[in-house]
Image (cartoon, rainbow, N blue to C red):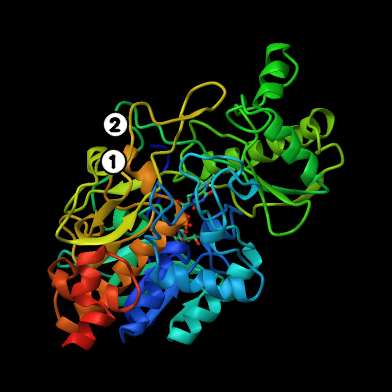
Amino acid sequence: MGETIAYRRELPVARTSEVLVVGGGPAGIAAAIASARQGARTLLLERFGFLGGNATAALVGPFMTCYSLDGQQQLVRGIYEELVRRLERIGGALHPSGIPAGSPYCGFIVFGHDKVTPFDPEAVKVVALEMCREAGVEIQFHTFVFDALVEGGAVTGVVAASKSGAEAVRARVTVDCSADADVAARAGVPCRTGRDADGLTQPMTLFFRIAGVDDARVEAYVRAHPEDRRPFAGLIRAARERGEWAIPREGVGMYKTLEPGVWRINTTRMQRASGTDVRELTRAEMEGREQMLFLLRFFRERLPGLEHCRLYDSAATIGVRETRRIEGEYTLTAQDLTEGREFDDVIALAGYPFDIHSPDSAGGGTGTGELRSANIYQAPYRCLVPVGVDGLLVAGRSISATHEALAAIRVMPPCFALGEAAGTAAALAIRHGVQPRHVPVPDLQAALVRLGAYLGEARAARYGPAAATAD
Ligand SMILES: Cc1cc2nc3c(=O)[nH]c(=O)nc-3n(C[C@H](O)[C@H](O)[C@H](O)COP(=O)(O)OP(=O)(O)OC[C@H]3O[C@@H](n4cnc5c(N)ncnc54)[C@H](O)[C@@H]3O)c2cc1C
């Protein structure tokens, strides 16, 4: 370590709350709404000036499937389904039930891409905010949480920085939805990062959108070249072999949006960069923008239907696929997903398959090796409960899972479901006067099912509206 200085000051306790949610992405939105709906005084802190996380700030989309792998059964419902229905009403999304695998909204991809949800990020900013405010969530934007308050082995709040300076915020239960386990790591929860073998994480991607695309020509070309695993893979390979264009992916990750001629591009690639190191993040942002301009030139020069495309916008922040994962009471494994293992403390179901973007291979391919997830898999509550530290739950991208299991459950619909469970559990912990790890799981599951979550047929029968009528 280089030079260090000692720095010490008194901080005001700016706010107190029963439940504090850190981060307003998919997990944090659902956690805050669920907690407030359970009657807990809930405060959400978010570093940007709007909600949505990757869905808005990083322009990531569509929402990957909320269905079983075979596309037959919707698994993620609850707050996610409410959000999608409300987006639909203002023309800000298409319900996944009408989006078949292989459609342009799925990037023409078939496996694992049945029933995605195309959405407008601007509509998500508006509707997520409305839903939080209607539920009674207090929100503070422009606030970056950089430390945890820990007393007697429990998190009792956080320290945050903003234009108002450094301030403390106290809470009885904190739900860390920062995607980087920022609170958990600062509180001393053991965390892992990346692959077991070398710690390398999935690459980052700067999303951008292009306008002026000839949708019909793109679709006609892609349909006429079924040998391409991804759109335009043959043209990219040929250009690379001639040494003309070193495109960082095997094909163009391109997803049609709700606006004619406008597509999201998921094709830049920054490998070997850490999303929890500000200097590496800065380098990745710069490299992402260079790659974006390079890709735009390639698209215009070489790709049918993209000759007249122009930059529509680029993400406000680079998309980070993977950073810290907490060590929780249980660690979700690849085997749990391949076997579709059932857990007594199930709190979410999902069907999106393993999707590991190579941390190091040239060409930046995606792959899952021999891993094949079950049609439906489960996440247990214990994955949200950190070992050794009380007063804290973790939801979203940094739950307790292996690198491989996370590569499936990290997509946005399951993150909504995990957040909804964490927020509900946090409020129940307060109501019962217990630590989150001691929340009675049947009470948690019953509350989730009553609020519209789907935890399988048996629990729907036990806790759902029909069961209440039968009583
Ligand atoms: C390049 C890329 C492509 C992807 N493609 C898809 C896709 O097509 N479909 C899909 O469904 N999923 C996709 N994913 C996965 C998905 O976007 C994420 O895994 C998911 O958004 C995680 O949700 P989250 O709520 O845990 O975190 P995030 O969406 O990252 O939200 C975290 C929130 O916390 C805030 N925050 C972070 N740290 C702090 C702090 N210290 N203090 C205050 N606020 C903080 C952030 O500003 C953000 O709003 C992709 C991800 C990437 C990076």
- Label 1 Cα neighbours within 10 Å, binned few <14 / some 14-19 / many ≥20: many
Evaluate whether residue 444 shows in this view: no
Q: Nearer the viewer, residue 86 or 276?
A: 86
In what element is the residue under mark 2?
Answer: loop
Q: Quadrant of the N terminus?
A: top left
Q: Nearer the viewer, residue 169 or 308?
A: 308
- Label 2 Cα neighbours within 10 Å, binned few <14 / some 14-19 / many ≥20: few
Mark 2 vs 1: CB contact within 8 A:
yes
* Location of residue 448 with respect to 6 vertically, above or below: below
Q: Is residue 315 left or right of residue 200?
A: right
Q: Is residue 468 left or right of residue 194?
A: left
Instruction: Report x, y in % for residue 468.
Output: 22, 85
* Location of residue 356 with respect to 180 vertically, above or below: above
Instruction: Report x, y in % for residue 280.
Output: 52, 39
The residue singled out by tag 2 in the image is 196
Instruction: Report x, y in % for residue 466.
Output: 25, 81
Evaluate whether residue 54 shows in this view: yes
* Location of residue 363 with respect to 398 vertically, above or below: above
What separation in Å lies between label 2 and label 1 (alpha carbons)?
Answer: 8 Å
Q: Amino acid at mark 1?
A: Thr
In what element is the residue under mark 1?
Answer: loop
The dot on residue 402 is 1
